[in-house]
Amino acid sequence: MHPDVTPESGDSQPLRIGARVVVELLRLKADPPDTTKLILADARSKNALAVLRDRMLALQQNLPFPAGTPSVASALDEACRDLQIPLPVARPDWGGIRLLDQLFDQWLQHQQLDEQAQQWLAFLRLPVIRYAILDYSFFFTPQNLMRRFLNQLHLVLLSSSQKSRAVLRESLLPLLQRIHTEFKQDIGACNRICIEAQTWFASHSDKVGQIEEQLRTQEISLRKEQVAEPRVVRELNRIAGGKVLPRMVMDFLHGEWRRSLLLISMREGEEGSTWKRQVRITESLVELALGCEDEKGREKYRSFYPVMMKNIKTLLVSVNEDSEALEEALDPLELILTALLNGARADAAEVPMLQASNAHITAVAVKQVGTRALSRIQALAVGDWVRIMTADGAHDVFRITLKAADDEPWVLVSQSGKTITKKTAFQLAQGLEGGVLDIIGQGRWWDDQLDQQLTQLHALWQEELARRPPPEPPKPAVKTPAIKTPATPTTTEPATDVALAALSLVSLEQQASSHHGATADTASRTEQILQNSNLTLAESEPASSAEEVEDFLAPHAISDEERETALQAIDQIQVGGWIVQQTSKGEERCKLAVRLRGRDKLIFVNRLGVKVLEIDRQPLAELLARGLVTIVDTGQKFDNTLERVVRSIQEDRKPS
């Protein structure tokens, strides 16, 4: 097996393909151009590459935003027809153009997008392909900033509802306009925009995440209530149902005391110690109310009365934090019990049997649903995305916030955070079969599609390698006197290279030098994370093709402007915000626990509160610019608009 290919355990895992192999796979995608003005070459020519980049930039600059091209390969065929000599294009570059053209076609044809989304995609095709040719990490690492941006944008464009347009698309439109105007030949300009987009997405995700957490808590509380309510009703009916009690005692039992019983039953269940105390106090209260018929009974309960009232006051948890509400609930009870102990006759009535409120589904329409659709729905996890068609024919993308069992409803929150829906697994499966629901999964469309395409190309590459004849055994070395020979060029013919140099419209920009301000420990920390990422290239490439391949894999030098944008993004993370860092074991979510302002140091912990990362502000920005750290939650304060959504749900649940 090739050293740059790593097998995964299990058939469902994608094949991990190294950077150098990706270059070889892209060669297989390089079908011959439609014009004789473009010819395929095995290696890159500096001047030919400059002409190719200039022609693609000219194509973009000649198109008004948001106009685009239906095919970059076809547009290049047409744009190069005026060349006096054929333009050599490296096979991996041409294969990359053809591959991304194909993926954009799939995105447009199979996603049922609205007109605006189609316009945005048509515009993005050319900048994305230009970016990928400038930075091959787009093809082989999911941490690439442009790939992350495209994954997030894919979810946005799948939602066409008015709420989604107002919240998401209007915010992203200026970023796309900046890509059109600012992205020339330096991918740093694109990376800066992608970092800003990542920060905006993180801020928005934080707001939606908070509403999801409140909804999750409310839904879990509701489901506990559905179990606890019958238990409370059963005990009250057992203790007081059918008995003749003073009306004020009955009102207390069926009012505030019932609510307190419900809260404790939800919190502890029927085995909790506080719940058992409440049941015993309920029994004692009914016994006292019934036992004051004669002086002997009244004498018996006079000494017990203060202890019982103290316990009732302690266990009245529904109002024990509100002194006025507590006094309002206890005053009538104390008044009637004191009167009973003094021999008074109170207005009494038979206590009716309570009926438990049933929030469960009692009847469903008899309709069959396929086991395959139901299995696909059941396989979804919390955090996965689905796309649902709305009543007006638009679409909205929802994330699963709470997954339920049996016939309980699932809770789903839209990407904009403005819409909340509840559906059972059966209803979701019906939507899947009926074509009104599509499963999106984790929302990494570009990662999934690139993995799929490269895996297919890898299988073809393996077949081609198998058909090649075995290499001849090395011949014994023969010592011969050294003869000096003139050096021969390794690229295109000299005359062609000179002609292409004359055709270049702009000179190649020099890459910015590496930043030297980091300290020694900072550099080691950055290097450690780089080694754990997919940006690390395999070492064992045959020397015969190493120089040729390395030309495609030259790393992008981080510019000062990119660092400044990354620093601004880092400064927006508040305590409680989350990032994802790349480790040797994969992605790890880390929460900002401490920010030491004087020392520019940030300390992150994992979900268990264990410190996993202590890093200065500057190197963290460097990792963010390289895509090795991603901001997923800035920890911003809760949005008033979303808070009103939650409050409206709470109001709807209150009894009228």
Image (cartoon, grey):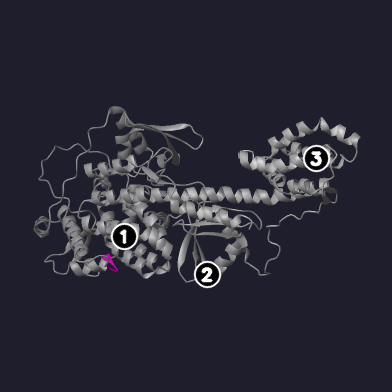
Q: Which residue is found at the position 34% from the left and 55% from the top? A: 25
Amino acid type assigned to the residue bearing label 1 in the image = Leu
Is 44 one of the magenta-colored residues?
Answer: no
Q: Residues within 10 Å of mark 2 (few under 14, many from 20)?
A: few
Q: Is mark 1 on a helix, strand or loop?
A: helix
Of tags 1 and 3, the one toward the viewer is: 3
Q: Earlier in the sequence, mark 3 or mark 2?
A: 3
Number of marks: 3
The residue to which callout 1 is attached is 173
In the rendered structure, the answer to whether residue 52 lies left or right of residue 438 reads left
- Cβ–Cβ below 8 Å for labels 2 and 1? no
Q: Mark 2 points at which residue?
A: 435
> Could you tell me residue 33's position as x and y percent?
25, 67
Distance between the alpha carbons at the discs numbered 1 and 3: 73 Å
Residue 132 visible in image = yes
Is residue 539 in sight in this rendering?
no
Estimate the x, y position of residue 320 in percent, counting from the top left.
64, 38
* Image spot of residue 435 (x, y percent): 52, 69
Say which quarter of the image contains residue 505: bottom left
Which residue is drawn at the image coordinates 70% and 65% (left, top)? Answer: 363
Residue 104 position within the rendered picture, expressed as x and y whole percent measured from the top left: 35, 64
